[in-house]
Image (cartoon, rainbow, N blue to C red):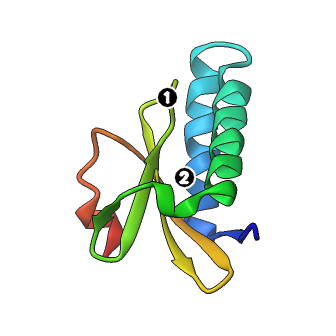
């Protein structure tokens, strides 16, 4: 049974910020980022336990083309996405 994905407001803002930044670099790059984010959510929906624990009780999955990580937790029948952060950032500051 697939789990429902819930994206928190901070994670939504992370995605919008990254998408806008990529769009400022090259036309359609922001859309490409959003599409990869969406495709990664589909992978999560299918097999959320596949990805490792990263920090405390949060798991993480990396986007393939872009250097971003999705931080999430499995709760009952939900996958809660807390943040979507660039891989070069110190994540502990943002995940507490």
- Report how far apart the C-alphas of labels 1 and 2 lie in the structure: 13 Å
| Nearer-the-camera pick, 22 or 33 | 33
- Does 42 sit left or right of 18 as displayed? right
- Does 25 sit left or right of 87 as displayed? right
Asked where in the image residue 51 lies, by quadrant, the reply is: bottom left
Q: Is mark 2 on a helix, strand or loop?
A: helix
Q: Which mark is residue 66?
A: 1
Asked where in the image residue 62 lies, by quadrant, the reply is: top left
Q: Which residue is drawn at 63% across and 36% down?
A: 19
The answer to whether residue 71 is seen in the rendering is no
- Does 40 sit left or right of 49 as displayed? right
Q: Is mark 1 on a helix, strand or loop?
A: loop
Q: Residue lying furthest front in this view?
A: 1
Q: How many marks?
A: 2
Q: Name the residue under label 2.
A: 14
Q: Residue at x 68, y 59 (%)?
A: 45
| Nearer-the-camera pick, 34 or 74 | 74
Q: Residue at x 61, y 22 (%)?
A: 24
Nearer to us: label 1 or label 2: 1
């Amino acid at each position: 049974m697939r789990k429902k994905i819930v994206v928190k407001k901070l994670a939504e803002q992370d995605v919008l910020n990254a998408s806008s930044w990529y769009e400022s670099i090259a036309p359609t790059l922001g859309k490409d980022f959003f599409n990869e984010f969406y495709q990664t959510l589909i992978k999560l929906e299918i097999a959320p336990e596949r990805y490792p624990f990263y920090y405390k009780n949060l798991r993480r999955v990396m986007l393939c083309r872009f250097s971003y990580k999705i931080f999430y937790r499995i709760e009952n029948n939900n996958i809660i996405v807390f943040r979507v952060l660039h891989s070069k950032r110190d994540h502990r500051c943002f995940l507490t």
